[in-house]
Amino acid sequence: MLAEPSLQENNPEKVREDFPYPWWILYVDGVVNNNRAGARVVLITSEGHHLMSAIHFKFYITNNDAEYEALINGLKIALEVGVVNLIAQSDSELVVNQVNGGFQSRGPRTELYMRCVQCLLQRFGSARLEGVPREKNGNAEPWKKWACKWTMCC
């Protein structure tokens, strides 16, 4: 006698809804100094693996722009690898508060950056942007050592 197929076998969307997607963490940081500008991105998988990326800007950019660029690129990377639930963390109080609605954006470029981040955050199943102290951003010594080998000295 054959067993009756389960409800889940007949409804693949139901299976997808019931599957708990793990949370990933994204750390971002933009850096501008006298002769260099760049961004650091660390995406931590639900299993604890670190995916690191560094961006070097060869054009004039402000520190706030670098922070936004780091966040935008980090969010795009997370979407590209299929992250569904994300906690993004930045040490830029300005960026975090502008994106979350606590501060107004000033100027058309900042407004575009802010709206881009808000749009990207909406593409996740669940996502939020949190502020973290500078010393806790980047999540660990291996990242700092790797970043310093690149071009951005600590």
Image (cartoon, grey):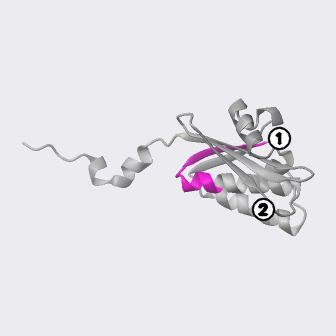
Q: Is residue 32 visible?
A: yes
Amino acid identity at mark 1: Cys
For residue 149, side relative to residue 48 (left or right): right
Q: Residue 51: where, in percent of width, then height?
A: 60, 43
Magenta-drawn stretch contains 89: yes
Q: Which mark is residue 113?
A: 2
14 in relation to 138, above or below: below
Q: Which quadrant would residue 46 be assigned to in this image?
A: top right
Which residues fall within the magenta stretch? 76-90
Q: Which secondary structure, mark 1?
A: loop
Q: Residue at x 79, y 59 (%)?
A: 57
Give the crowd class for mark 1: few <14, some 14-19, many >=20 residues within 10 Å. Answer: few
Question: Which residue is labeled 1 in the image?
Answer: 153
Find the distance from the CA under tag 1 to the CA under tag 2: 26 Å
For residue 6, side relative to residue 19 (left or right): left
Nearer to me, 63 or 147? 147
Which quadrant of the figure contains the N terminus?
A: top left
Extreme residue toward the right, this view: 34
Nearer to me, 7 or 37? 37
Magenta-drawn stretch contains 51: no
Q: Which secondary structure, mark 2?
A: helix
Q: Residue at x 82, y 36 (%)?
A: 134
Q: Residue at x 56, y 56 (%)?
A: 80
Amino acid identity at mark 2: Tyr
